[in-house]
Structures are given as C-alpha cells and as structure tokens.
Amino acid sequence: MKTNILKRNEDFNKIIKEGKRNNNSHFIVYSLPSLSFHRDTFCIGVSVGKKLGNAPVRNKQKRIVRDIIRKLTKENLICNKQFVVISKKNCLESSYE
C-alpha cells in the first residue's frame, strides 16, 4: 500500500472540520473518505502539540504513531481514507505495545 503524508495546514483543517472524530485517552483521530481513485492509498497526518515536550520528544512520538499505522496497513485494515492523528499527553506514559 502506498502512504501519503499530509503536510499542508489546509489539508489538516479540512479533515478536522469535515471528518468523523474518534478519541480515547491517548489519541484523537479524525477520518474522512479519500477522493483518490486508487483504492489502496490513504493519507495520514500526525500532530503532536508543544505541551507534550521538546522537539525530540514530539518527533519520536510522530515516528511511533507512523510505525503503528504502517503495521496496520500491512494487515490491510486501512484503505481509501484520510486521517489526522493528534496525540494527547497520556500517550507519552503508555508503552509502545
């Protein structure tokens, strides 16, 4: 599966405004059906706020989230969607597993 990384602020805002919201104690996930014609592609954007820590801590959290999503795509659980994942403070205290 091909993964596209969302980087533009307009893309984040569109998915947050129009998408469906799911949250738990660690993450907020917004999802929106993709308009792409390829059924095996999806887009993801990861956001970690400055309240969680300095730049190395935030970048590590982004890498962890992307790795989790990469493993989910290998199991074909995600397709033809756009996602924005926002990490909460509790995610730093939890283990990777």
Image: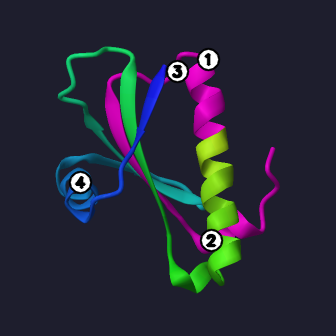
Rendered image: mark on residue 58: 2
Mark closest to the chain's N terminus, 4 or 2:
4
Between label 2 and label 1, give the one nearer the viewer. Answer: 2
Residue 71 percent location from the top left of the image: 66, 29
Q: Which of 49/54 is in front?
A: 54
Task: Give the Cα distance between marks 3 and 2.
Answer: 26 Å
Mark closest to the chain's N terminus, 4 or 1:
4
Contact between marks 4 and 2 (CB within 8 A): the answer is: no
Q: Secondary structure at mark 2?
A: helix
- The kind of residue tagged 4 is Asp
Q: Secondary structure at mark 4?
A: helix
- The kind of residue tagged 1 is Glu
Q: Which residue is mark 3?
A: 77
Q: Which residue is mark 4?
A: 11
Q: Is residue 15 left or right of residue 55?
A: left
**Label 1 CA crowd tier, 10 Å (few <14, some 14–19, many 20+):** few
The stretch of residues the image draws in magenta is: 68-97
Q: Residue 36: which quarter of the image? A: top left
Between label 3 and label 4, give the one nearer the viewer. Answer: 4
Q: Secondary structure at mark 3?
A: loop
Query: Residue at 24% across / 31% down in the picture?
Result: 33
Residue 70 located within the stretch drawn in magenta: yes
**Label 4 CA crowd tier, 10 Å (few <14, some 14–19, many 20+):** some
Rendered image: mark on residue 39: none
Q: Is residue 48 left or right of residue 56?
A: left
Mark closest to the chain's N terminus, 3 or 2:
2
Query: Residue at 28% across / 16% down in the picture?
Result: 38
Query: Residue at 65% across / 53% down in the picture?
Result: 63
Q: Which residue is mark 1?
A: 75
Task: Give the Cα distance between marks 2 and 1.
Answer: 26 Å
Residue 88 located within the stretch drawn in magenta: yes
- The kind of residue tagged 3 is Leu
